[in-house]
Image: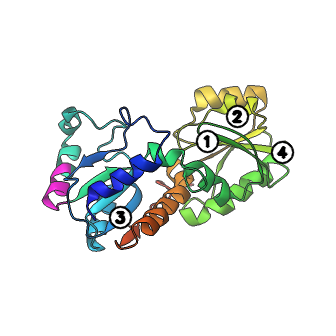
Amino acid sequence: MKAIDLHNHMREIGKWVDWGNTVDRFIIGDPETEVTGIAVAWQSRTEALKEALRRGCNLFVTHEPTFYRHREDSDSIFDDPQAAAKRKFILDNDLVIYRCHDVWDQMPDVGIVDSWAKHLGLGRRVASEQFTAIHESPAPTLEQLARHVASATEYLGQPWVEMVGDPKARVTKVGIGCGAIIRVREMIDLGADVVIATDDGTRYWYTGAWALETGTPLIIVNHATSEEPGIRNLARYISEKFDGTKTEFISQGCMYSVIR
């Protein structure tokens, strides 16, 4: 296969994407490149790119940006010396970087939102909107739910979560979002009485204060942690659709550690 074949497939299935205004595209490299292997990871950080090369992959599929901006469509991104050095490394090693973000955020069943819900072992879905879903809670109180979530995220490198609210608060309906797209008030309007948010999608001075004053319980995890299950499913999906091409999932998990 050629790298362009993957893009054409994503265009075919991603009917919900505005293909004239999307970040899903080739970020760098020749789309006509013959693919030796496909590496899939949450983000195309340099160490992951090196790992892809070690595994014999020259097409790297990333969910998040390569050069530190959501829209990587201006040469001004290379004013940053680190971005310029990274570009040189990619070109010197004949890598092709393809971003799969807008397709996979809303992909049914195996995309970001549904994969996260399944990984957490949430109950039946009772409501949903774009980038948002409400599920029955697998635990009766905020603290018990927080411990349940931490147990589910431990193997992703995050054996703890942040918790806002009364630990004994009763919870029945859990709102989840899509990575950094955390619409807490929309989730409450849809019936959620607790929200599992991400650090990139939550501002404590705003969302945290509002949650405390309204008595809305929050559980907060790392952005990368919440999307890793969906990216694992992306790798599995690509492997099935292009079964003649080696596909490698590169796990990254939580981006930081907590020191006390």
Start-end of magenta stretch: 87-94
- Which amino acid type is shown beneath numbered disc 3? Ala
Point out the image quarter for the N terminus. bottom left
Q: Is residue 90 magenta?
A: yes
* Whether residue 43 is situated above or below residue 73 in the rendered picture: below
Residue 19 is marked as: none
Question: In the rendered view, does 92 fall on the left or right side of 239?
Answer: left
Cα separation, mark 2 vs mark 3, equals 34 Å
Residue 39 is marked as: 3
* Residue density around tag 4, few if under 14, some if 14–19, many if 20 or more, within 10 Å: some
Q: Earlier in the sequence, mark 1 or mark 3?
A: 3
Q: Is residue 40 magenta?
A: no
What is the secondary structure assignment of the residue under circle 2? helix
Q: Is residue 249 visible?
A: yes
Q: Earlier in the sequence, mark 2 or mark 1?
A: 1
Closest to the observer, 88 or 169: 88
Instruction: Look at the numbered discs 2 and 1 and tell me whether their residues touch, using CB distance below 8 Å.
Output: yes
- Which amino acid type is shown beneath numbered disc 4? Thr
Q: Which residue is mark 1?
A: 177
Q: Main secondary structure of the magenta part?
A: helix
Residue shown at 61% from the left, 63% from the top: 154
How far across and down, in percent of the image, does residue 100 sit? 40, 49
Q: Quadrant of residue 128?
A: top right
Q: Earlier in the sequence, mark 2 or mark 3?
A: 3
What is the secondary structure assignment of the residue under circle 1? loop
Point out the image quarter for the C terminus. bottom right
Residue 187 is marked as: 2
- Which amino acid type is shown beneath numbered disc 2? Met
Q: Quadrant of residue 207?
A: top right
- Which amino acid type is shown beneath numbered disc 1? Gly
Q: Earlier in the sequence, mark 1 or mark 4?
A: 4
Cα separation, mark 1 vs mark 4, equals 17 Å
